[in-house]
Image: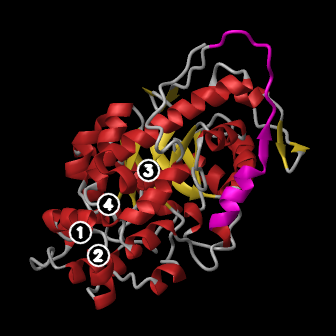
């Protein structure tokens, strides 16, 4: 029987990495990562909804050889696993964007860099190679839009992801209680919290204060190195302009795979396909935007049934382990992304963290396929799946 090599036994689950990351990251950075919006009902709804899904195992299968390799947009990956875009990653762990880009290349999974990353696409793109995707928050200025898309292509990014579910900043009350502000303010409380995390502090001192690095070149009058000016620019020029005509213009500018991220309704999914998107990314932004949104997993099957094979279905929001990956695939996903688990990894283990999470998830995925008695990821859709103990009809 084939078994995957198990990673470090000190951290055998994402939850173990989460506990260690909490002890190594400053409180404000932790709150930025781990919080939702409002009373965080949407964030908890995501994980609760995934936990209500069960898959029926079949035994007596003899020796099986699980294959977790996955083809997507003309490339074969080692597993259906992607590192979701998280803005300002280097706030949570200095140099985090490049660490995760290296993991994507070395482990043959996907890394999606955020527009609001603290490192540039020019630095990170060559590291991830064609395992890199770029996530675009839509700029209002057509010239900036065109330039950002060209930069992404020139940096080697394979797939462009347009995020649609941030029409305005959310309230993020928990972050505000923690004293998080952009640009950061060095209050006595913040300084105390930094000094309590000496490794983070020393790495940040060496690297420099994180900023929205991809935006620097667009801030005029030579003010691109002034963080206040960058923040003002982002607030006035980014977002709140995305509509279907905008997406059509992006489709004209980008000749590679195009994905619309943040879709929860069948209507939006079908319109994205009609415009020419190659993928529909089902997500509620990890519960960080709209507290009354449905759990992303609860919308997945209907979207898959509507879209069929017209586009690839990508999923994130609430995924914490390999069973969650299998649950999403069973309900129609072709590929599954995670954000927080990989940040927990680098927060806990620095440069080794991304690799550890990838190894952990891949080993867990293979093990659970043994438990189910399946050899391919497609086989999970042939099993009985229940939600709240009610059998569901799986999308074909």
Occupied quadrant, residue 314: top right
* Residue, disc 3: 342
Viewer-nearest of discs 2 and 4 = 2
Q: Where 279 sits versus 130, above or below?
A: below
Please report the residue visible at 59 percent of the width from the left and 36 percent of the height from the top: 334
Occupied quadrant, residue 373: top right
**Precedes in sequence: disc 1 or disc 3:** 1
* Residue, disc 4: 93
* Residue, disc 2: 194
Residue 349 shows in this picture: yes
Residue nearest the observer in this picture, 38 or 353: 353
Viewer-nearest of discs 3 and 2 = 2
Identify the secondary structure beneath mark 4: loop
* Residue, disc 1: 201
Q: Label 2 to label 4, Cα distance in Å?
A: 12 Å
Q: Is residue 72 located in the magenta-colored stretch of the structure?
A: no
Q: Label 1 to label 4, Cα distance in Å?
A: 10 Å
Residue 320 picture location, percent across and down:
58, 49
Residue 142 picture location, percent across and down:
32, 65
- Which range of residues does the magenta coloring cover? 43-64
Q: Quadrant of the C terminus?
A: top right
Residue nearest the observer in this picture, 277 or 301: 301
**Precedes in sequence: disc 3 or disc 2:** 2
**Precedes in sequence: disc 2 or disc 1:** 2
């Amino acid at each position: 029987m084939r078994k995957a090599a198990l990673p470090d036994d000190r951290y055998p689950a994402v939850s173990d990495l989460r506990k260690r990351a909490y002890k190594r990251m400053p409180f404000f950075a932790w709150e930025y990562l781990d919080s939702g919006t409002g009373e965080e009902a949407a964030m908890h709804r995501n994980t609760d909804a995934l936990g209500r899904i069960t898959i029926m195992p079949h035994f007596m299968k003899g020796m099986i050889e699980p294959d977790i390799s996955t083809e997507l947009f003309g490339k074969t990956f080692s597993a259906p696993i992607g590192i979701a875009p998280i803005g300002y990653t280097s706030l949570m762990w200095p140099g985090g964007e490049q660490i995760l880009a290296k993991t994507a290349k070395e482990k043959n999974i996907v890394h999606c860099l955020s527009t609001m990353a603290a490192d540039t696409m020019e630095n990170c793109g060559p590291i991830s190679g064609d395992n890199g995707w770029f996530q675009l928050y839509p700029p209002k200025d057509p010239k900036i839009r065109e330039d950002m898309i060209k930069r992404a292509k020139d940096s080697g990014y394979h797939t462009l992801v347009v995020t649609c579910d941030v029409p305005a900043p959310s309230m993020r009350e928990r972050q505000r209680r923690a004293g998080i502000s952009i640009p950061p303010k060095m209050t006595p409380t913040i300084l105390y919290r930094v000094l309590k995390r000496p490794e983070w502090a020393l790495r940040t001192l060496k690297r420099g204060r994180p900023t929205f690095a991809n935006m620097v070149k667009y801030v005029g009058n030579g003010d691109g190195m002034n963080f206040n000016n960058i923040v003002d620019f982002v607030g006035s020029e980014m977002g709140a302009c995305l509509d279907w005509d905008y997406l059509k213009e992006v489709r004209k500018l980008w000749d590679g795979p195009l994905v619309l991220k943040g879709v929860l309704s069948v209507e939006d999914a079908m319109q994205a396909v009609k415009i020419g998107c190659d993928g529909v990314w089902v997500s509620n932004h990890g519960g960080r935007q709209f507290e009354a949104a449905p759990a992303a997993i609860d919308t997945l099957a209907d979207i898959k049934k509507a879209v069929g094979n017209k586009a690839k279905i990508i999923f994130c929001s609430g995924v914490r382990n390999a069973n969650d990956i299998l649950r999403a695939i069973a309900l129609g996903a072709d590929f599954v992304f995670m954000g927080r688990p990989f940040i927990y990894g680098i927060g806990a283990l620095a440069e080794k963290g991304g690799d550890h999470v990838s190894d952990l998830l891949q080993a867990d995925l293979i093990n659970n396929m043994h438990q189910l008695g399946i050899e391919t990821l497609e086989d999970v859709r042939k099993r009985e799946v229940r939600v709240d103990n009610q059998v569901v009809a799986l999308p074909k």
